[in-house]
Amino acid sequence: MSSFASSPGTRDILSPDSSRWRLFQATFAEVVERAGYQYIIPPMFEELGVFLRLGDSTEVVTKEMYDFEDKGGRRIALRPEQTASVCRAFVEHRPTTPWKVWYAGPNFRYEKPQQGRYRQFDQVGIEALGVDDPMLDAEVISLASNFYQELGLQQVQLFINTLGDEGDRDKYTEALRLYFTENLSLLSAESRITLEKNPLRVLDSKRPEDQAIIGGAPTIRDYLSDGAAEHFQAVLSALDAMNIKYTLSDRLVRGLDYYRRTTFEFVSTALTAAHTAIGGGGRYDGLVEQLGGPATAGIGFAIGLDRTLLACDAENVFAAPNTSVSVFVVDTTGGIHAAELCLLLRSNGVSVDRAFDHRSMKAQMKAADRRGAAIAVIIGSDEVEQGTVVIRPMGDGQQFSCPKSNVLETIRLELQKLGS
RNA sequence: GUGGGCGUAGCUCAGUUGGUUAGAGCGCCAGGUUGUGGUCCUGGAGGCCGGGGGUUCGAGACCCCUCGUCCACCCCA
């Protein structure tokens, strides 16, 4: 084969999906900008070290990193997520806090592709730095929830948990290690390996044989410092006040090591495939410090574009926007008149398409239909002679001719009449 | 990274225990309609049957390898 296809785990997003993607991002932008979040565009690659802070016990770092050496001998990695980049940017620019930003764009992880899981995958998300008020946690969560509503999704469930402060988390992790080690014989082989790397993650196992022992595991609640417990209670109270439904899940630990205190995940109950998590996030107080900045609180979430759209499909909401054109110009005299008219209409804000290659009138009309035009403007030799054009509504309306000098206003009027 | 299913026209898929010129529907192009789309009718274009090797007189069908894709696991969005 001498032809090419896109690399594994990547694909072309064609119309109308591409328009749907754009609308998705625009909808997200509207929701979060309304709340004072500002757009940030971090680079798609960073020095590898930026991402190593995500934790060396996470697979995102150990085996899924898309890293390489550039021509200057630097260790570079394509970003596997954007939180670390945003924190790096914070350290680099030191903006005044609270710093509330949102982003949209692709991330990269080297893993085996599947539906809803790609090597290049898009996320939208927000990060808020410099505030450790639990009210901010609640705001962040409410914005995600608000966005899902805006898309029309109803079957989205919010799971929430706290991982405590760093000390709490460490004590809890130790307790888990002890508990699972005592019950090692009851654990699946895979979970035993996970146990060595990160006991917290054993809680994530979906293997049936692990469920019983996980059920009896100690919970984080018994290890929370007073401060962390209070913080969590405050977040929950705020969610209650905003009437945001949630499910407490003390097994929710999430993949990246930097999470502290509040963590949450949004799951689509409309999806039956394995990947039902359509968004998630949490607090990461301490990450900025690890990246060389001052001790700074931080919280955010990321929402997966593909998976969320799969959920939209499953619920039959958020359809692709219409990409048709208002006017289609049919010119059987060679195309110059079409060129003139297209220019006139386009520069006056009317969307117009036309045919090329001297196609028959029938073929051009067919193209007009396919293009979804509300009206066709027909220019034949008679019209050229008389200095007119024919305006033909593509629906039920009657076609009529109009002088060339009036064409712009007539078309505007007609489009208005047709409501398009 | 592990295990399994599937790769035939632009798309969705037929193709008998291996048998000669590889099919359908949709889409596309043209004509029926010498100035008119959406319905209908007729015709046409478009395939190294994912790639490589093997078995055989003969392979789209069978075997091996490889690539891609889907599903499950792992993990995550």
Image (spheres, coloured by chain):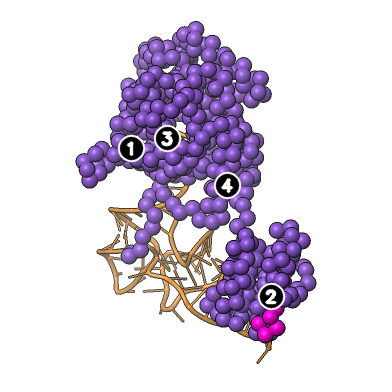
Q: In the picture, residue A355 is in which quadrant?
A: bottom right
**Can you identify the residue that label 2 sits on?**
A404
Which residue: 66% across, 20% down? A241
Q: Earlier in the sequence, mark 4 or mark 2?
A: 4
What is the display colour for chain A? purple
Q: Earlier in the sequence, mark 3 or mark 4?
A: 4
Query: Where A103 sits versus A357, above or below?
Result: above
**Can you identify the residue that label 3 sits on?**
A82
Q: At numbered mark 2, what does the secondary structure look like: helix, strand or loop?
A: helix
Instruction: Evaluate if marks 4 and 2 touch, with contact meaning CB atoms under 8 Å apart.
Output: no
* Chain shown in orange: B
The residue at the far left in this view is A73
Query: Where A182 sits versus A370, above or below?
Result: above
- Kindly indicate whether the residues beneath marks 3 and 4 are on one polypeptide chain: yes
Give the image location of residue A148, x and y in percent.
Answer: 60, 36
Give the image location of residue A264, x and y in percent.
Answer: 52, 25
| Magenta segment | A384-393
Crowdedness near tag 1: few (<14), some (14–19) or many (≥20) residues, C-alpha within 10 Å? some
Q: Earlier in the sequence, mark 1 or mark 3?
A: 1
Give the image location of residue B3, x and y in percent.
Answer: 37, 42
Q: At numbered mark 4, what does the secondary structure look like: helix, strand or loop?
A: helix
* Principal secondary structure, stretch drawn in magenta: strand
**Can you identify the residue that label 1 sits on?**
A46
Q: At numbered mark 1, what does the secondary structure look like: helix, strand or loop?
A: strand
| Front-lying residue, A391 or B47 | A391
Q: In the visual, does A69 lie left or right of A37?
A: left
Which amino acid type is shown beneath numbered disc 1? Answer: Glu
Does residue A244 belong to the magenta stretch?
no
